[in-house]
Amino acid sequence: MTSNEISLAVATAVSEALKAMTPAITEALDAHKANSAACDDTYAALIGQLVFIRTVTMTNCGRLVAVLPQAFVLEDAVWVANTGRWSNFCKTGNADEVEPFADGPVYVGKAGLIDMAKLPKIPSAK
């Protein structure tokens, strides 16, 4: 067998394998799209609410104004450096140490999300 014949045989085998996998891949992608849409609908219910977002590196609060494919968009956002007693923070929105962001929207990446919850108020700097 020549190298061209071997290349053609390999390409044919790969092509056939991909054709066989296509329905399963399409089904998996459709399921992922449906799950993603359901998640976005869940987050969309929080639009307009005051929320606390904990990510792998930061803790932010603000009014959730949009949910993008890759990010949450907050207005009136603050970084919470120290929540103080956790249960008190969750009930009251009072924190020990808070730094406001500059004016304008703040984009929080969804990939780093740990948890999100509604808050009764946006914490303010003391």
Image (cartoon, grey):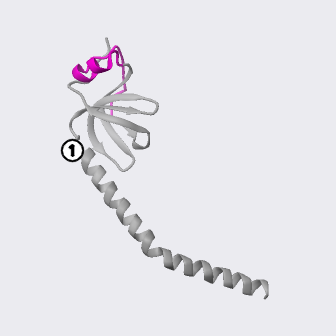
Is residue 78 found inside the magenta-colored segment of the image?
no
Drawn side of residue 124 relative to residue 80, left or right? left
The quarter of the displayed image where residue 125 is located: top left
Viewer-closest of 17 and 60 = 17
Residue 85 rendering spot, x and y as whole percentages: 32, 16
Q: Mark 1 is on which residue type?
A: Ala
The relative height of residue 15 versus residue 95 in the rendered view (above or below) is below
Is residue 88 found inside the magenta-colored segment of the image?
yes
- Name the residue beneath numbered marker 1: 45
For image coordinates 28% across by 20% down, the residue present is 87
Residue 80 rendering spot, x and y as whole percentages: 37, 22
Residue 110 rendering spot, x and y as whole percentages: 39, 43
Q: Considering the image in quadrants, where does the N terminus appear? A: bottom right
Viewer-closest of 58 and 26 = 26
What span is colored magenta in the figure?
83-104
> Which residue extends farthest top?
126
For image coordinates 39% across by 38% down, the residue present is 113
Residue 93 rendering spot, x and y as whole percentages: 25, 21
